[in-house]
Image (tube, helix red, strand yellow):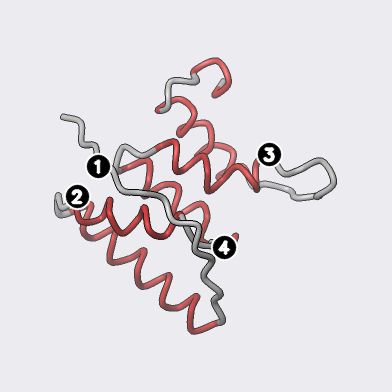
Amino acid sequence: MYFTCFVEYSDKVVRMGSSGHRHLAETLDRLDGLIRSGKKAEACVELRKLVGGKIPRAFALRLATLLRRTEQPTLGLRVLNPVVRPPHKKVVSSSDEEKVEYAFCLSNSGAYQEAI
C-alpha cells in the first residue's frame, strides 16, 4: 500500500538555538511515533513543513529517514543533498549513514543506477 500527500513547499528559514534543537528533537520523536502508529497523513504534513526550513546537520539524517518512511524520498534527497553532494567550494564530509540514507532515497525515487 502506498501513501502520497501533497503540500506546498515553504522557503521559510527557521533559526534555532539549543532550545530549538530540543524542540526539533521532540518534534521528530513525535513524528516517528505517528508513523509507527499508522498516522502517516498527519506526519506527512508536518514533515513537509520542516523541509522548508533550515535543518541543523545533526537532524538531517533523521529527518530524511522519516521522509523516506512516509514515501517522500525526493524530500529526503533535498535534505541530505547539501551534506552528501556539497557545492564545490564547500568542504563537507558525510558519514556512511548519511550516504546510505541518500542511496535509499535515490533508489526509492527511481534513480537506481545512481543509488548504486
The residue that mark 2 highlights is 41
Q: Residue furthest top?
A: 113
Q: Is residue 88 above or below residue 1?
A: below
Query: Which quarter of the figure has residue 2?
Result: top left
What kind of element bears circle 3? Answer: loop
Q: Please state which amino acid type lies under the numbered disc 3.
A: Arg
Q: Work out whether residue 15 or residue 80 is closer to the camera in this orientation and state it.
A: 15
Tag shown at residue 90: none
Q: Nearer the viewer, mark 4 or mark 2?
A: 2
Q: Work out whether residue 7 or residue 81 is closer to the camera in this orientation and state it.
A: 7
Of labels 4 and 3, earlier in sequence is 4
The residue that mark 4 highlights is 58
Q: What is the C-alpha distance between the residues marked 3 and 1?
A: 27 Å
Q: Position of residue 37 (x, y in %)?
A: 15, 54
The residue that mark 1 highlights is 5
Q: Please state which amino acid type lies under the numbered disc 4.
A: Ala
Q: What is the C-alpha distance between the residues marked 1 and 4?
A: 26 Å
The residue that mark 3 highlights is 85
Q: Residues within 10 Å of mark 3 (few under 14, many from 20)?
A: some
What kind of element bears circle 2? Answer: helix
Q: Residues within 10 Å of mark 2 (few under 14, many from 20)?
A: some
Q: Nearer the viewer, mark 2 or mark 1?
A: 1
Q: Please state which amino acid type lies under the numbered disc 1.
A: Cys
Check whether the beta carbons of the residues at disc 4 and disc 2 lie within 8 A of each other: no
Q: What is the C-alpha distance between the residues marked 2 and 1?
A: 7 Å
The N terminus sits in image quarter:
top left
Of labels 2 and 1, earlier in sequence is 1
User: Which residue is drawn at the image coordinates 54% and 24% (left, top)?
Assistant: 115
Q: Position of residue 39 (x, y in %)?
A: 16, 53
